[in-house]
Image (spheres, rainbow, N blue to C red):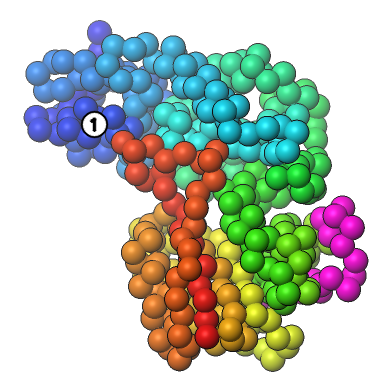
Amino acid sequence: MKAAVLKPGRDKAVRNRHHWIFSGAIRDLPDFEPGEILPVRDAGGDLLGHAFFNPRSSIAGRMISFGSEAPEAAVRENLERALALRRTFFDPVVTNALRLVNAEGDGLPGLVADLYDDVLVLQSATLGMDKLKPLVVDTLARALEPRAILERSDLPARREEGLDQVEAVLAGEPVDRVRVLENGVPYWVNLAGGQKTGFYLDQRESRQLVRAHAAGRKVLNMFAYSGSFSVCALLGGAVRADSVDSSAAAMSLAQDNFDLNGLGSESGTFFTADVFEFLREPTLEHDFLILDPPAFAKKRADVVAACRGYKDINRLALKRVRAPGLVLTFSCSHFVDEGLFRQVVFEAAAEAGRRARILQRHRQALDHPVNVYHPETDYLKGFLLYVD
């Protein structure tokens, strides 16, 4: 049987159940169809598992099973294990919007599956997972019986895999918008054209944090998108919560979420503006600022420029927040790790001439597990700062 054979001494990562195989670790590759699943063997011929391969990608192979387990059986089992984990921690009466599959975090490289009430949204980042899509759809459809299964595979990573962006209805009916619950709070989620798969599910714990500490404060929510941080701040007793985003469509969605929660026009203002420019303008005073920008570093080569951007925006926020105040700041750039982001925040505070203390680090949501064998799954960093 044809197989991918690793170089001597280059099998340690796979033996440690890491999912990625870089091209430099491979000694021999047979002729194969891009995206095909191949056995993976060490230099001595021992079977290490199975991976799908794509010669166009810098990550040449991605393991989907280890040892002697059949690859298709491993996919089904990992899907079932992912669903079981979510059933353990989430009550659908309270929260019916959650991530069901978190890629390598659930042993399924390149696959994200998010559930919004009775609508399932899939993202595939790799050619190999595209080829496994019928198996994935069949398994999840049988387990969940959703009203619809949509695909939002519009990720930049697909370009390296030689794949087009895809938005499609895989099963059921088209759904543009759905109403969901998160910790009992209702939100509208735009599934057609919204950011990510429609909602920032990875910020669930941070929304709870804002709700717990917003009482009596004037909140400024930047890169606000659907306004979820603003809604939680007001439900937590904030005096007002103003929202800023460069997208008029996002601000319209935020307004809809205010209306859905019975929050009147006096609760906050919606600014369609560039956040960097907005922070430089004199305007309303706030003592709780939230910074949740998009990823500034899409690839490793972007890290230096990204850190300049993160420092600039955190410096502006730290200069502006009224003391004693709070700043909740995030980076979702995979290539900017927590240590580097903390250094950036330190430099921003020093340049702003403000005293800042870290009260709490970002706490990951339970439906975004990090695979201990694959730490690259961990991407979101955040600090709650006390500024006086």
Residue 204 appears at what percent x and percent y?
A: 62, 50
Magenta-tinted stretch: 257-274
Q: Can residue 230 be seen?
A: no
Identify the image quadrant of residue 377.
Answer: top left
Looking at the picture, tell me which residue is in the foreground, 309 or 314: 314
Q: Can residue 338 be seen?
A: yes
**Quick one: SS at disc 1?**
loop
Residue 87 appears at what percent x and percent y?
A: 60, 27
Does the magenta portion include 383? no
Q: Which residue is labeled 1 in the image?
A: 16
Residue 220 appears at what percent x and percent y?
A: 69, 74
Residue at image position (13%, 30%) is 7
Residue at image position (85%, 55%) is 261
Residue 183 appears at what percent x and percent y?
A: 70, 45
Q: Quick one: quadrant of the N terminus? A: top left
Looking at the picture, tell me which residue is in the foreground, 273 or 377: 377
